[in-house]
Amino acid sequence: MDFSNILLLLIGAALLFLMMRRGGCCGGHSAGGHDLHRTDDNSNYAVDPVCGMRVSKKNAITRQINGKTYYFCSEECANSFRG
Ligand SMILES: [Zn+2]
């Protein structure tokens, strides 16, 4: 029985686990993990030009105005926007 090898494996696995947790998403932020706190993936988000809210492009209301796509948080904002 070689217990020192098992110990090394366990330490290695623990370090790997810690590294994956830290590097995984928010770069060390421990507060929550809500989407709104993330600033590193702006390509998935747009700013509503009417109210200034950050909206997910997936869920936003979109309008094509003069060949440009605008994203809104709601129909209300979309309707009150006049390019
Ligand atoms: Zn809005």
Image (tube, helix red, strand yellow):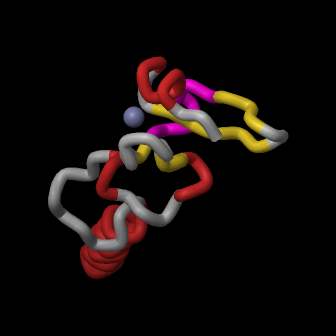
Name above or below for residue 7 compared with residue 76: below
Taking the spot 30% from the left edge, 56% from the top edge, the residue there is: 37
Image quadrant of ligand 1 equals top left
Left or right, 54 with respect to 10, comes to right
Name above or below for residue 61 compared with residue 11: above
User: Could one spot residue 1 in this view of the protein?
Assistant: no
Query: Which quarter of the image is occupied by the C terminus?
Result: top right
Q: Quadrant of residue 24?
A: bottom left
Specify the farthest residue to the front: 82
Taking the spot 33% from the left edge, 49% from the top edge, the residue there is: 36
Taking the spot 19% from the left edge, 52% from the top edge, the residue there is: 32
Closest to the observer, 18 or 62: 62
Q: Quadrant of residue 17?
A: bottom left
Residue 60 part of the magenta segment? yes
Closest to the observer, 32 or 21: 32
Q: Which residues are magenta?
A: 55-62
Name above or below for residue 28 compared with residue 64: below
Give x and y (percent) for residue 68: 76, 43
